[in-house]
Amino acid sequence: MRKKNSTNFLNEVDLVENCGMFYTLSVIGGRWKVGILATLLDHEALRYSEIKTKLKNITERMLIKQLKELQEEGLIVRKDYAEVPPRVEYRISEKGRSLEDVLITLGHWGKKHRNG
C-alpha cells in the first residue's frame, strides 16, 4: 500500500481522473480481469466454480479479489440465490458489456504483434 501523499500515488490519481485511457487500463488491468470479463461475455451467467474451471490457473484468493474489484467498478453483477446449498451467479453488466469492442480490439492487436 502506497502512502496517500507520495508522488507516485498522486500521479496515479491524477492520471485516472484526467486520462480516459489510463482509467480504462486501471479498471481492466491485471492478469485476470480481462479473462474474467471475456469469459462472462461468452456466457449469460456463470457460477463461481464455472469461472474457476475456465480460468484454470487462477487461485481462489485471486479470483475472489478480482471478482470483487470488477463488481465495485460496476462491470459485473453478482446475484445471490436464497437456496440450500447457497448459489451465486455472476453476469456481465451493461457497463461491462460496453467494453466488448475494446477487448476484441486488444485481442486482435495482441495476435498481430505477439511474435514480433
Image: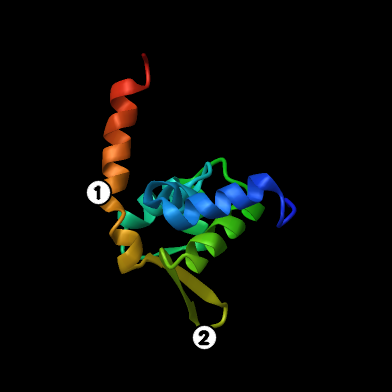
Q: Amino acid at mark 2?
A: Ala
How is the structure coloured here? rainbow
Q: Residue at x 34, y 29 (%)?
A: 110
Q: Are marks 2 and 1 in contact (CB under 8 Å)?
A: no
Name the spot of residue 18 as percent of width and height, x first: 43, 54
**Position of 12 relative to 76 (above/below):** above
- Classify residue 75 as left or right of residue 67: left
Q: Residue at x 63, y 48 (%)?
A: 59
Query: How many numbered marks, from 0 up?
Result: 2
Q: Which mark is residue 82?
A: 2
Q: Nearer the viewer, residue 33 or 91?
A: 33
Whichever of labels 2 and 1 marks the residue nearer the N terminus, that label is 2
- Classify residue 96 as left or right of residue 30: left
Q: Quadrant of the C terminus?
A: top left
Kindly state the secondary structure of the residue where label 1 is placed.
Answer: helix
- Classify residue 25 as left or right of residue 109: right
Q: Residues within 10 Å of mark 1 (few under 14, many from 20)?
A: few
- Classify residue 6 as left or right of residue 52: right
Q: Residues within 10 Å of mark 2 (few under 14, many from 20)?
A: few
Kindly state the secondary structure of the residue where label 2 is placed.
Answer: loop
Q: Residue at x 71, y 57 (%)?
A: 4
Label 1, on which residue?
101
Name the spot of residue 22 as percent of width and height, x first: 44, 47
Q: Amino acid at mark 1?
A: Asp
Name the spot of residue 69 as percent of width and height, x first: 54, 61
Name the spot of residue 51 as percent of width and height, x first: 47, 55
Direction bottom: furthest residue: 82
Q: Residue at x 56, y 64 (%)?
A: 68
Q: Nearer the viewer, residue 39 or 30?
A: 30
Foreground: disc 2 or disc 1? 1
Label 2 and label 1: CA atoms lie apart by: 35 Å
Q: Which mark is residue 56?
A: none
